[in-house]
Amino acid sequence: MLTAVILAAGEAKRMGQLKQLLDWEAENTILGKTIDNLLTAEIVDEQLKVVVGAEKEKIKKYLLEKYRSELKKGILKIVENDDYQKGMMSSIKKALTQLPADNQYLLFTLADKPFIGPEIYSEFYQKCLELEAEIFLPEYRGQKGHPVIIKNKFRKIILKLEGQAGLRNLFEIVPEKIYRYPSGYQEITVDLDFKELYQKYRDNNFKLK
């Protein structure tokens, strides 16, 4: 049983504005595309949690309008993190509360990952299950990417961790539990952190190349 988490609470300081709601393709946003791709992958059989923090009311309004049906059905859940300035780990901990009793796996990705398509999410999760990986960490040419998939058994450890580095705090403690999956998808490493990069893809009709 899989619960997915999209970390969308950051201030996007390097972008200089709220990047989660920047346009992406026709009538969509960066965050919306990321959510749509995960839902389309049809691997989330528990819940898709979206953690919001910075400018949360603006993002919540957007989500309530676009995903009214999914929110009503409980497929999608908005998680508020008022401690978002403490770093990504604070958002991860918020997402780990109130999990289904039979949860087995947790998938984490970032709000600014619109290039990761449904087929990638599906492939990675199936590989994770086949390999019985405890921590599934995809890479592209040696560079770590997303999504990261972990077994629920690490939940209690994560809730006790301190620091701002997100799941890297966990990786440092249990490196022997990590399965590094080599993939051919450059998409998994692309972050939209800077205006110049966003504009580049926008000018290229939101294509990677």
Image: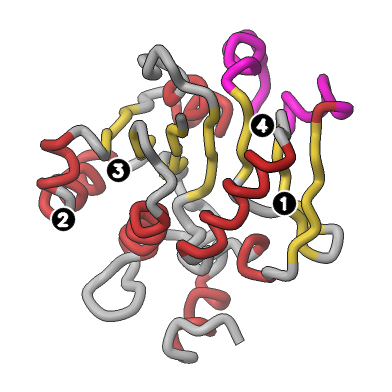
Of residues 68 and 131, which is closer to you in this image? 131
Q: Residue furthest bottom?
A: 204
Quadrant of residue 133 within the rendered picture: top right
Residue behind mark 1: 138
Residue behind mark 3: 55
The CA span between labels 1 and 4 is 14 Å
Q: Which residues are magenta?
A: 152-176
The CA span between labels 3 and 2 is 17 Å
The CA span between labels 1 and 3 is 30 Å
Q: Check disc 1 and give the amino acid type.
A: Pro
Of residues 24 and 40, which is closer to you in this image? 40
For the residue carrying disc 2, how many other residues have a C-alpha within 10 Å: few (<14), some (14-19), or many (20+)? few
Sequence order check: which comes first, mark 2 or mark 1?
2
Instruction: State yes or no: discs 1 and 4 in contact (Cβ < 8 Å).
Output: no
The CA span between labels 4 and 3 is 24 Å
Regarding mark 1 in the picture, which secondary structure is present there? Answer: strand
Instruction: State yes or no: discs 1 and 3 in contact (Cβ < 8 Å).
Output: no
Q: Is residue 20 visible?
A: no
- Given this view, does label 3 or label 2 mark the residue nearer the observer? 2
Q: Position of residue 12 (x, y in %)?
A: 48, 52
Q: Position of residue 209 (x, y in %)?
A: 61, 87
Regarding mark 3 in the picture, which secondary structure is present there? Answer: loop
